[in-house]
Image (cartoon, helix red, strand yellow):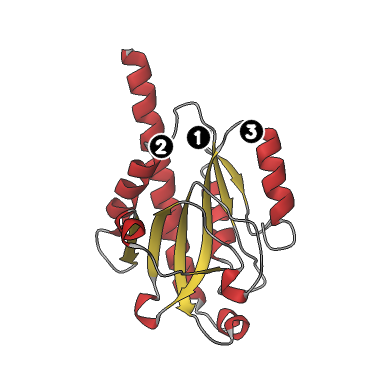
Amino acid sequence: MTQLPKPSQQQQLSCLKIPHTDPEIHSAIIHRLLFHLSQAEDKQQVIIVCIGTDRSTGDCLGPLVGTALARYNSPWFHLFGTLEEPVHAVNLQDTLSSIYALYDNPFVIGIDACLGQSASVGCIQVANGPLKPGAGVHKELPPVGDIHLTGIVNVGGFMEYFVLQNTRLSLVVRLSDIIATSLHSAIQEWKSRATLVARLD
């Protein structure tokens, strides 16, 4: 569970925040992801780390995204964190250590739920740099990702554990579906473009 910091002006320029009800949300997220992916090297392995637990309604966004992405059985990325094998506070450090031992200079995409202001609930964010899992519930965990996506699932600032347990599953499922489909489409398009350029060269 990530906590939203107050973004600087530079961070605002590199961060997309969009309500899940926006009719253009898929294209907006895909476009922003393609912008960030264009900063990666063609040969970098893409690693997606979906953080959270299936034991909390509000914190199951990451595992839901991971489970949805796993169904694509895509060759374009490596996936960590599903409902069956979640990545959470207990095993996050070991998971990251394994990733950097297995893959040379990977491009890591972090995914997590977060709490925010009431007006932002239901928004999805795409931002440059790592997310800080656990900050929303006052845990010290390692940062994750060269870029990250977060879904704002409920209001933060008080009784965070209670708020997470009383988050509407319908909202979390909707956010996870948008993130998974948009992320898969963006990576597929990025890889297709890279393959086409390589052929032309």
Q: Earlier in the sequence, mark 3 or mark 1?
A: 1
Q: Nearer the viewer, residue 159 or 14?
A: 14
User: Element at badge 2?
Assistant: helix
Seen in the picture, residue 165 relative to 32 is either above or below; the reply is: below
User: Element at badge 3?
Assistant: loop
Looking at the image, do the residues carrying marks 2 and 1 touch, with CB atoms under 8 Å apart?
yes
Figure label count: 3
In the picture, the disc for residue 76 is: 1
Q: Quadrant of the C terminus?
A: top left
Q: Residue at left 39%, top 64%?
A: 124
Q: Nearer the viewer, residue 114 or 192?
A: 114
In the image, what residue type sits under mark 1? Trp
Calculate the distance from the C-alpha at mark 2 to the C-alpha at mark 1. Answer: 7 Å
Badge 1 crowding class, 10 Å Cα cut-off, few under 14, some 14 to 19, many 20 or more, is some
Calculate the distance from the C-alpha at mark 3 to the C-alpha at mark 2. Answer: 20 Å
Q: Residue at left 50%, top 70%?
A: 114
Calculate the distance from the C-alpha at mark 3 to the C-alpha at mark 1. Answer: 14 Å
Seen in the picture, residue 188 relative to 170 is either above or below; the reply is: above
In the image, what residue type sits under mark 2? Gln
Badge 3 crowding class, 10 Å Cα cut-off, few under 14, some 14 to 19, many 20 or more, is some
**Percent position (x, y) of residue 42?**
44, 27
In the picture, the disc for residue 188 is: 2
Q: Quadrant of the N terminus?
A: bottom right
User: Element at badge 1?
Assistant: loop
Q: Earlier in the sequence, mark 3 or mark 2?
A: 3
In the picture, the disc for residue 103 is: 3
In the picture, the disc for residue 97 is: none
In the image, what residue type sits under mark 3? Tyr
Q: Residue at left 42%, top 40%?
A: 187
Residue 52 picture quarter: bottom right
Taking the image as shown, residue 35 lies to the left or right of residue 49, namely: left
